[in-house]
Image (cartoon, rainbow, N blue to C red):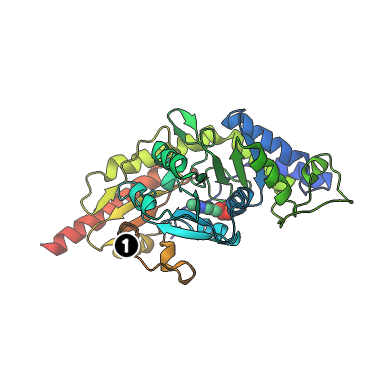
Amino acid sequence: MNSIRVSQSVFGQEEIEATKTILEKGFVGMGPETKTFEDDLRYFIGSEVEVVCVSTGTAALQLAVQACGIGFGDEVLIPTFTYVASFQAVSATGATPVACDIDLETGCIDIKDLEKRITLKTKAIMPVHYASQICNVEALQEIARKYNLRIIEDAAHAFGCKYNNQLCGSFGDITCFSFDGIKNITSGEGGAVVTRDHQVANTIRDLRLLGVQGDTAMRIKMKRSWDFEVAEQGWRYHMSDLMAAIGRVQLKKISYFSARRVSLACQYQNHLADVKCVEIFPIKYGAIVPHIFPIRVREGKRDSLKEYLNDNGVQTGLHYKPNHFLSKFKTEYLLPNAEKMYAETLTLPLHPAMDEEQVSLIIDLIRTFNNLNERDNL
Ligand SMILES: *Cc1c(COP(=O)(O)O)cnc(C)c1O
């Protein structure tokens, strides 16, 4: 049986042509194509911001934390309910990721729990826009002002999403995107830091090239800095022109990808609303481009629904195992909402290569599963 994948990359002839052009140049490192992708992204998000492309979304987060001068002895508040990338990005800088609980309605960081965990060592908050929901912007900004904290958004799910009619990346302090294979747009692998803070942007331009000062300007002209200065720990986290070429094509397809994702997510939402064993996140699509479609499954039925769908050729995912369940990031305290959410959530397939018929098939399977369970409970 052919299985429906939970997520996948969608490429066409255009991406193949774009990479071919770069390969034929015989130069695949970081150069003019990366600069042009950064310009394209800046134009898309709004011209006030600076965009620095890097090798992955995780690298974007790590460099953003480091560029704020945050490191050993400092603490960064993060929702435990996120991909381990967010936690590893913080701990890679030497700073301590402090796990916070989430709001059960959205899966985003819980403001009250977060405020409780602020100490003298707290330097930043890393909110995660879970399932593409832009979380608590005003409340987070208020807390950041009150305690003098940076906000480094993990916007890996939220490329192309709007809040109050403004695109994600245009209103934040520092926003980090991922362009890995399954995100709203992909450059194969890649990420970007978007900020209005020129100093942060310039620092990251150096940090992504092993800390070599001013090397970005040289590379864009296809030159190298042979006699150079390095004053800080840097990394080889730049984006390659090969990746940038893919990203540029994908960015041109964002309206199409968004429309497909929104349409499929709305279909799930409309047709699963009355199914007893599941609960749908109350997300208003339109301004939101859904990267994943998680649902909540009631009464301990999550694993059996997962197995039932799998047996019928439908892959699902679990977003996410809480980070405080991992030995590296375990906490002395419980985070009950995140733990409950983890036990109940299941991510259904969602990507632009899917069609309405496949979503209908998945909806029918969930309805059948629900009816079988109701009968058993009589
Ligand atoms: C994908 C993702 C990342 C990491 O991005 P990469 O490009 O894979 O390094 C970080 N946080 C979240 C929430 C993600 O989904």
Residue 262 visible to the viewer: yes
The quadrant in which the C terminus is found is bottom left
Query: Residue shown at 14%/63% (left/top)?
Result: 377
Residue 189 visible to the viewer: no
Is 121 positioned to the left or the right of 62 in the image? left
| Label 1 C-beta lies within 8 Å of the nearest ligand 1 atom | no
> SS class of the residue under badge 1?
helix
Tell me residue 245's x, y (percent).
Answer: 70, 42
Q: Residues within 10 Å of mark 1 (few under 14, many from 20)?
A: many
The quadrant in which the N terminus is found is bottom left
Query: Residue shown at 32%/65% (left/top)?
Result: 303
Total numbered badges shown on the rendered structure: 1
Which residue is disc 1 drawn over?
A: 343
Is 25 positioned to the left or the right of 333 in the image? right
Outermost residue toward the right? 227
Tell me residue 325's x, y (percent).
Answer: 41, 67
Outermost residue toward the left? 378
Tell me residue 85's x, y (percent).
Answer: 53, 58
Picture quarter containing residue 265?
top left
| In the rendered image, the vertical position of residue 156 relative to residue 98, given as above or below | above
Is 214 positioned to the left or the right of 89 in the image? right
Taking depth in this image into account, of 218 and 276 the one nearest to the observer is: 218
Q: What amino acid is found at the position of numbered circle 1 in the picture? A: Ala
| In the rendered image, the vertical position of residue 269 relative to residue 329, given as above or below | above
Picture quarter containing residue 298?
bottom left
Tell me residue 358's x, y (percent).
Answer: 40, 47
Outermost residue toward the bottom? 327
Query: Residue shown at 47%/66% (left/top)?
Result: 329
Is 357 positioned to the left or the right of 32 in the image? left
